[in-house]
Image (cartoon, rainbow, N blue to C red):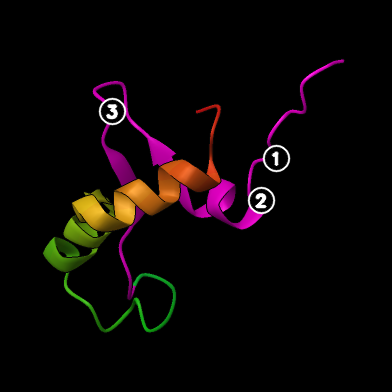
Amino acid sequence: MAKYKMKTHSGAKGRFYISGSGKVLRRKININNFRRKKRGETLRLISRKMAVSPGTARRVRRLMPYS
């Protein structure tokens, strides 16, 4: 009998990705609205990715079994 494949959670797939070193990364908040008010330095810092906490990373890895 064939084994079943686990499904990747499509919401997690869009929000997180796993780097080459194995870190789970996410986008920072406050980037979408009122960009004109924000300083250039702030926008540059916000545009970078951010690593999630170890507990959250464990949960995200469960949702994305093949990444």
Q: Position of residue 61 (x, y in %)?
A: 43, 41
Q: Are the two marked residues, 1 and 2, in contact with CB atoms closer than 8 angstroms?
A: no
**Side of 33 relative to 7 (left or right):** left
Q: Amino acid at mark 2?
A: Ser
Number of the label disc, if any, that sits on residue 55? none
Q: Position of residue 50 (x, y in %)?
A: 23, 52
Q: What residue did someone put label 3 on?
A: 22
Q: Are the two marked residues, 3 and 1, in contact with CB atoms closer than 8 angstroms?
A: no
Q: Closer to the camera, 10 or 49?
A: 10
Q: What residue did someone put label 1 on?
A: 7
Q: Quadrant of residue 24?
A: top left
Q: In terms of secondary structure, where does tag 2 sit?
A: helix
Within 10 angstroms of label 1, few (less than 14), some, or many (20 or more) residues? Answer: few
Number of the label disc, if any, that sits on residue 10? 2
Whole-number angstrom distance, CA of label 3 to CA of label 2: 20 Å
Read off the magenta span.
Answer: 1-30
Q: Residue at x 33, y 47 (%)?
A: 58
For residue 14, say whether it is visible.
yes
Q: Amino acid at mark 3?
A: Gly
Within 10 angstroms of label 3, few (less than 14), some, or many (20 or more) residues? Answer: few
Q: Closer to the camera, 30 or 14?
A: 14
- Mark 3 or 1: the one toward you: 1
